[in-house]
Amino acid sequence: MSKNNTSVGQANNVKWKDVPTRTIDVGGVPFAYRELGSDSGVPLIFLHHLMAVLDDWDPMVIDGIAAHRRVIAFDNRGVGASGGSVPNNIEAMGRDAVAFIRALGLSKVDIFGFSLGGGVAQMVALQAPELIRRIILAGTGPRGGGGIDEINRIAIIAYLKAALTLSDPRNFLFFPRTPEGKRAAKDYFSRLKERTENRDKPISLQARLAQLKAIQTAGLSAPDDLSVITQPVFIANGDRDLMVNSSLSNDMARRLPNAQLTIYPDSGHGGVFQHHKSFVPAVLNFLNN
């Protein structure tokens, strides 16, 4: 396995919108990734949400954390510019994430999983606990959690609303339809447009369908024994999450032996983006403690 020979660290004045996309060979499959921040300490690996690619990470979150930590975000197998096909279960997604981390030559990482990425992060922690120091889970729930299997219906409704209003479905999935929620959505989508060159490839139809199947299957599966995940875990969600009810975040916090929970007010699935001014310092404090 090999990667290109661009230097690992990024200058402090480089922002997420300007970071080059790199590739690394993982078992014969090219994985696309970007990294930002100082090449020191334990890096933080980002695992993104359903139907997302690298350009869907909020620059305010990435840049805020990367000002103090090394951040690595990547497209898992079959997503965006990465090769291969997306598997239809989160166990295989977890194995691919572990393979990517090891291909980078990393022996210890922190992981941040948002939504589907949070399910994958749990798989990584269960499959390769020796790799993981600390875990951040946002807008996500445990395998076997009630309601997660309804994601197809929720997504279809949001996409219908988006088609009728000529807007992005995340307006309805990530943010409440309140004045504050609408302002947060507008700011979020404005930030996502900051990168104007060398953008990632869009998510494919195969990837979309496989990810939806993986989420549905996870929701109907037997629960995992989360008590074996002993690393410190920071769980965050919005109190109006349509996709992953905050009760599932509470359930995870109870079942994980070393967890802390924050529920952001008047926010939805994208609560950590809406409340980035609070979330970023909380993440840095958690990682440094």
Image (cartoon, rainbow, N blue to C red):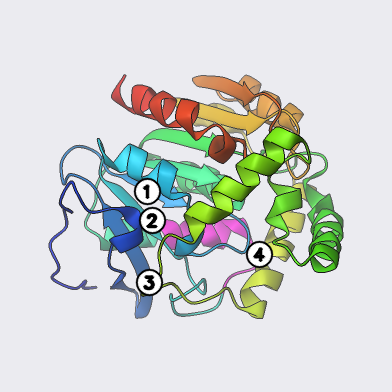
Q: Position of residue 102 (x, y in %)?
A: 29, 57
Frontmost residue, 252 versus 267: 267
Residue of label 2: 73
Using the numbered discs, state the Cα–Cα distance from disc 3 to disc 2 in whole angstroms. 11 Å
Between circles 3 and 2, the one closer to the viewer is 2
Assign the magenta stretch its main secondary structure: helix
* Residue linked to disc 1: 45
Count residues near mark 1 (Cα–Cα under 10 Å), then give few for <14, some for 14-19, many for 20+: many
Q: Which residue is mark 4?
A: 211
The answer to whether marks 2 and 4 mark residues whose Cβ atoms lie closer than 8 Å is no
The amino acid beneath tag 4 is: Gln
Magenta span has 91? yes
Specify the quadrant that holds the N terminus: bottom left
Identity of the amino acid at label 3? Phe
- Whether residue 215 appears in this view of the structure is yes
Query: Callout 3: few (<14), some (14-19), or many (20+) C-alpha neighbours within 10 Å?
Result: many
Vertical side of 212 occupied by 86: above or below: below
Q: Which residues are magenta?
A: 86-97
**Residue beneath disc 3:** 31
Mark 4, residues whose alpha carbon is within 10 Å: few (<14), some, or many (≥20)?
many
**Do labels 1 and 2 touch, CB within 8 Å?**
yes
Quadrant of the image occupied by residue 199: bottom left
Tell me the element at label 4.
helix
Q: Are marks 3 and 4 in contact (CB under 8 Å)?
A: no
Picture residue at 38% right of the left edge, 24% below the top? 286
Kind of residue at badge 2: Ala
Among numbered discs 1 and 4, the one appearing first in the sequence: 1
Amino acid carrying mark 1 in the image: Ile
Q: CA distance from mark 1 to mark 4?
A: 20 Å
With 134 as the anchor, is 205 left or right in this view?
right
Q: Secondary structure at mark 3?
A: strand
